[in-house]
Amino acid sequence: MSVRDKSIYLASRSPRRRELLKQIGVPFELLLLREDLRRGADVDETPLPDESPGVYVLRMAGAKVNTALRQIAVRGLPQKPVLAADTTVVFDDRIIGKPLNAGDATRILRALSGREHQVLTAVALALREQIEAQISVSSVWFHELTDADIRRYVATGEPLDKAGAYAIQGRAGAFVTRIAGSYSGIMGLPLAETAELLMRFDIPLW
């Protein structure tokens, strides 16, 4: 197989993950999983009782990549590595997922205001029976948000499909005073960890 033939499947709807893979020069094809619970999501993202955030994101990334592997087999698609990832926000040791609605987004942002929280992203890469995974943990600090700040941000619609009700690469970047960890991991795909996994599967960068 030539270098330019070494593409992967990306099992994600996230435009941020697409942008980040392009940034490091990895060619990919999209393999989309259903995320709309009303139509039957391919992966149940409900945390298990007493499940720690780290175990949760690793389990979710693994579930997504295994679902993608089954799709490849069922659809008779060419065999090549498939990448999946999962991101969650952790505040006061609680998993904060995507908000249910604008009111829930408002509640989450009020809780994060002026405080530190963690962002965990797990990445899984698989080919047939081989599955490898990595996890990135970062800390993020918000300045104090006014009710007007939160109201204007929620009105943009940006928080509604984001873990923790915000996107650091979007308008909410103005809320962040400091980070410790991986900026790309906070976006949804930690590039250092992803690159390490790709090397294990002999997938070249750029």
Image (cartoon, rainbow, N blue to C red):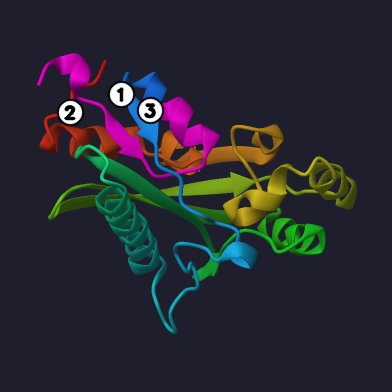
Q: Is residue 162 above or below residue 21?
A: below
Which quarter of the figure is the N terminus placed in? top left
Q: Nearer the viewer, residue 186 or 29?
A: 29
- The structure residue drawn at horizontal position 45% and vertical position 45%, both measured from the top left corner, is 32
- The structure residue drawn at horizontal position 77% and vertical position 44%, both measured from the top left corner, is 157
* Three-letter amino acid code at the position of disc 1: Val
**Helix, strand, or loop for circle 1?**
loop
Q: Is residue 15 magenta?
A: yes
- Tell me the CA gap for discs 1 and 3: 5 Å
| Residue 37, picture quadrant | bottom right
Tag of residue 203: 2
- The structure residue drawn at horizontal position 26% and vertical position 27%, both measured from the top left corner, is 7
**Helix, strand, or loop for circle 2?**
loop
Between disc 3 and disc 2, whose residue precedes? 3
Q: Residues within 10 Å of mark 3 (few under 14, many from 20)?
A: some
Q: Residue furthest right?
A: 148
> Left or right: 23 with respect to 149?
left
Evaluate if marks 1 and 2 touch, with contact meaning CB atoms under 8 Å apart. yes
Between disc 1 and disc 3, whose residue precedes? 3
Q: Residues within 10 Å of mark 1 (few under 14, many from 20)?
A: some
| Residue 9, picture quadrant | top left
Q: Which residue is mark 3?
A: 21
Q: Which residue is mark 1?
A: 26
- Tell me the CA gap for discs 1 and 2: 8 Å
Q: Is residue 138 magenta?
A: no
- The structure residue drawn at horizontal position 20% and vertical position 20%, both measured from the top left corner, is 5
Evaluate if marks 1 and 3 touch, with contact meaning CB atoms under 8 Å apart. yes
Q: Residues within 10 Å of mark 2 (few under 14, many from 20)?
A: many
Q: Which residues are magenta?
A: 1-20
Let me know if residue 114 appears in the view. Answer: no
